[in-house]
Image: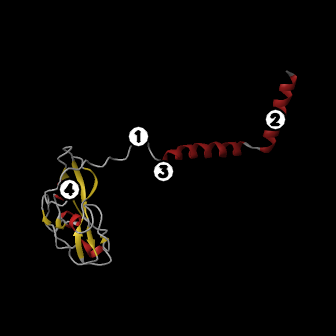
Amino acid sequence: MKFLDTFFETSARKIAQKSSRRGLLKGLGTALVGGAMLPLLPVARASNPAPKAPQDAGDATSCDYWRYCAVDGFLCECCGGTYNTCPPGTQMSPITWIGTCLNPVDGRKYVISYNDCCGTTQCGTCLCQRDEGDRPLYRSDKSNDINWCLGADSSVYHCSTAVVVGLAFEV
């Protein structure tokens, strides 16, 4: 047992000679502040799974398709693109108008971002103008009567997409 007493006494004296109370307080403070910062690091949270894509039903080339409740323009689905991608040779405008549409399959409302595809002349097929929830022009983010291609490289309008942004919550 004398061996253990000697070992711990020698170790404690070496640590005491190489450190100070201030150093101990500094280390303790660093550990506390660092430990408090850990929850702020960006990590993927398993408790918040990515939202599921809504179930689709209906013809995406028809003006009655559920995603097009606030669309105004030519449908990209008929112009070489899809309801959420622009046709080749066009660019999606970075500024949009939004709408909230009811999906008849699951009975939920979804926020839809209507992006204009810009860069070539108008498509000319599948013209659709539905104004559900359209607001007067003093609320331009809610209006579909503006050339949204002004935010793109080319201001020439071609067609419109309908991208689901997420689930709408009642406020």
Q: Is mark 4 on a helix, strand or loop?
A: helix
| Disc 2 residue type (three-letter) | Ser
Q: In which quarter of the image is the N terminus?
A: top right
Local crowd size for mark 2, using a 10 Å CA cut-off: few (<14), some (14–19), many (≥20): few
> If you read the primary sequence from the N terminus, does the residue marked by circle 2 or circle 4 appear first?
2
Q: Which label belongs to residue 42? A: 3
Kindly state the secondary structure of the residue where label 2 is placed. Answer: helix
Q: Which quadrant holds residue 97? A: bottom left
Q: In which quarter of the image is residue 27?
A: top right
The label number, if any, that marks residue 19 in the structure image: none
Q: Circle 3 sits in a helix, a strand or a loop, which is it?
A: loop
Q: For this rendering, which residue is in front, 21 or 57?
A: 57
Say which of marks 2 and 4 sits in front. 4
**What is the distance, in whole Å, between disc 1 and disc 4 at their CAs?**
29 Å
Kindly identify which numbered label has been placed on residue 11: 2
* Distance from Cα at disc 1 to Cα at disc 2: 46 Å
Question: What is the distance, in whole Å, between disc 3 and disc 1 at their CAs?
Answer: 14 Å
Nearest to N terminus: mark 3 or mark 1: 3
- The disc, 1 or 4, on the residue closer to the chain's N-terminal end is 1
Q: Sequence order check: which comes first, mark 3 or mark 4?
A: 3
Residue 6 lies, with reference to residue 62, above or below; the image says: above
Residue holding disc 4: 67
Cα separation, mark 3 vs mark 4, equals 33 Å
- Residue 109, how many percent across, how many down? 21, 49
Mark toward the start of the polypeptide (2 vs 3): 2
The CA span between labels 2 and 4 is 72 Å
Q: Where is residue 37 in the image (x, y as percent from the top left)?
A: 53, 47
